[in-house]
Image (spheres, helix red, strand yellow):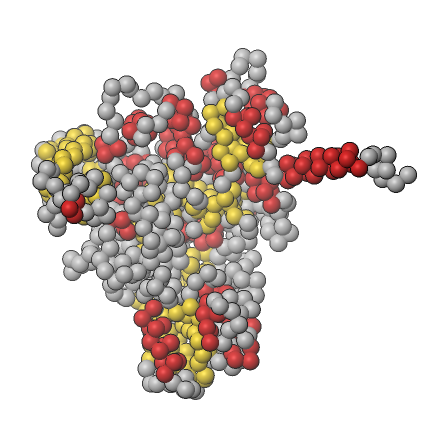
Amino acid sequence: MKPFSRFGPLLLQTLLIAITYRSFAVAQKKTYIVHMDKSTMPTSFTDHFEWYDSALKTVSDSGNMLYAYTDVIHGFSARLTADEAKSLESHPGVLSLLEEVKYELHTTRTPQFLGLDTSQSLFPDSTTASDVVVGVLDTGVWPESKSFDDTGLGPVPSSWKGECEAGNNFNTSHCNRKLIGARSFSKGYEGAFGPIAKTESKSPRDDDGHGTHTSTTAAGAAVAEASLFGYAAGTARGMARHARVATYKICWQGGCFSSDIVAAMDAAVKDGVNVLSMSIGGSVTDYDRDSVAIGAFAAMTKGILVSCSAGNGGPGSMTLSNVAPWITTVGAGTLDREFPAYAMLGSGKNFSGVSLYSGKPLSDSSLVPLVYAANVSNSSYGNLCMTGSLIPAKVSGKIVVCDRGLNSRVQKGVVVKDAGGIGMILTNTDSYGEELVADTHLIPTVAVGQLTGDAIKKYILSDTKPTATITFAGTQLGVQPSPVVAAFSSRGPNPITPDILKPDLIAPGVNILAGWTGAAGPTGLEEDTRRVSFNIVSGTSMSCPHVSGLAALVKGFHQDWSPAAVKSALMTTTYTTYKDGETIKDIATGRPSTPFDYGAGHVNPVAALDPGLVYDAGVDDYLGFLCALNYTSARIKTVSQQDYTCESGKKYSLGDLNYPSFVVPLQTASGQGGGSSAATVVKYTRTLTNVGTPATYKASVSSKTRAVQITVEPESLTFSKTNEKKTFTVTFSASSMPSGTNEFARMEWSDGKHTVASPIAISWT
């Protein structure tokens, strides 16, 4: 009998449709994070896990929990169809379902640049500082790195409850008194992509390099004679070199998934970390739909500071991620160090750029033919040097000018090499301006700014036989002006809550040297067979662990401070000008930057240890913030895991959150040009806590705008003891301005020794 021959055609067609539909439904399962109201568990269940499993089985006979969460949220994650998810959402005790979100991964000089090497007497001794644990959620760790040497460290802190997890290419002996914990989380990733590839270690081992780089930036031990191919030579060390490190691998080749991230945050809170460093970012959404924000809220309630990267979406406005006020959001600036390289043209002109190329150089005396990629390509996007886009017959033996964009900067060099080219000039477009990021290219390459790139292209057009060569000049220190805001650093205003200024501050994030994996080359490309102990990388992924490590330093010195107090100390002691009084520049525009670019300013760790006053905040402050957003009790519970009802009749104000910065959103009045004779008056109340010696602080406001009058009442505050609190009110009296206008000011409290500064951003819409 032939298969299905006993069925009629119509019945056979119906059966096939049913089978196809069933297969499609199974294939369309997605991971959901299920938030449960723990307090409503029926008495018929002996524990919450039994209850969670029962709830899951009501909608899916085959459903299995990926994770059960106990600390940062109450609930579980599971693979469900859309119909199953919808059904489960109406189950008693379910607060909400969040569909899985994919997140992406967003030093020898920085200690000196930040003043750490010259101020060791100001910092806590190793015994106190070594009680602090920095948890890093990233791609794992390369434990053989010298940056994890535990020489001189005492026993692991008794408060530590974590573990060193064995797995593929990783065993428990890889942990020590420096690297005290290591775990990996992959169930969410595998649910989406299938089993971990053989090219990756299903363990805490870092096959990528990003996690080793961030963790050693935050808290790596001092390593003498560190460099990348001789570039940036010196002693490499993390910001909190005596602190302990715990790593949580949550990112794999296909990305970082929210169910794994929540599981790692859940574990880190239980383990006993003091600081969580997360150089990742995803889509921007409301706080009760943002798994990182929800997990960070729980961490905050346990006294854990959460530091996150702002993102690499700059220089466009409103490109930030990780904007919850209980998260410290970090943008990126440059160092005073560059790696100069030069493009010498046949016209006799010599243009400067940057490079970390370390192979065989081109001749600095013999010029070779120079071509623009757009003219030697078979693609409409030929100028970008995408894979396979160059014509070998027109490229072989020549230097190729490629525009930056779409594919990675180092990949463009591989494309040129594969087509027979012998060198590359990488030119910025208007999206990147004059920002220069150095890379360890596989062929002789110099990266140049937009203006230089335009001049080189003009030369190619004007000369019948254009020629060039490329030379390299090593490491240059003392570059000025520095810092400048990196073009890639994501900018404000805050896309979720414009009333809260983000980023909070900036820190070094361009050309940062730190530890690296032994499993990948410095470019991360498959073609790169080189292996290095240290690598130079750029991104807000690099600025975030700087602040994480500095927060650990402050926490080691002030162990009783809340996360908000530590954050305030870092923010109110920042600087926004150079020594000559000029405002920190934005490299994307060449003009002065604003608080939407740098937040409170550039971090200044020596001053942060003794800030004088802090803007403290706790759980109740953030619950009031959620009330000001008109969150329902159910939404508040999703974020906070607490039963909380906003007081009826009470006026909650976003501007009254005790935050170290101020944003004043105003409505443009109707009329020609938004003009109006009536002033808008806005009042914000803040509370300062004295963390220094008794003193009297006087308020001052610096502002260049005539559209807003800013007054502080009272104008002075006298503190007679430590931890004493004083409240003040800031009044903004503003005339109307055209929609889209932004004005900025700065308020300072000073006792003659300390300066407690806050940025002010005023926007009309």
Residue under the image location 45 percent in, 84 percent down: 368
User: Percent from the top left, x then y, of residue 193?
Assistant: 60, 45
Q: Which quarter shows the N terminus?
A: top right
Residue under the image location 42 percent in, 86 percent down: 465
Q: Is residue 381 above or below residue 607?
A: below
User: Is 620 positioned to the left or the right of 719 in the image?
Assistant: right
Residue under the image location 32 percent in, 57 percent down: 486
Q: Which quadrant holds residue 82?
A: top right
Nearest the viewer among 243 and 299 is: 299
User: Percent from the top left, x then y, of residue 762?
Assistant: 20, 44
User: Percent from the top left, x then y, of residue 422?
Assistant: 50, 78
Nearest the viewer among 371 and 571 is: 371
**Residue 574 visible in the current orientation:** no
Q: Which quadrant holds residue 565?
A: top left
Residue under the image location 44 percent in, 76 percent down: 372
Residue at the far top in the pictured view: 43
Residue at the far right in the pictured view: 1
**Residue 562 visible in the current orientation:** yes
Q: Is residue 455 above or below residue 58?
A: below
User: Percent from the top left, x then y, of residue 678?
Assistant: 10, 37
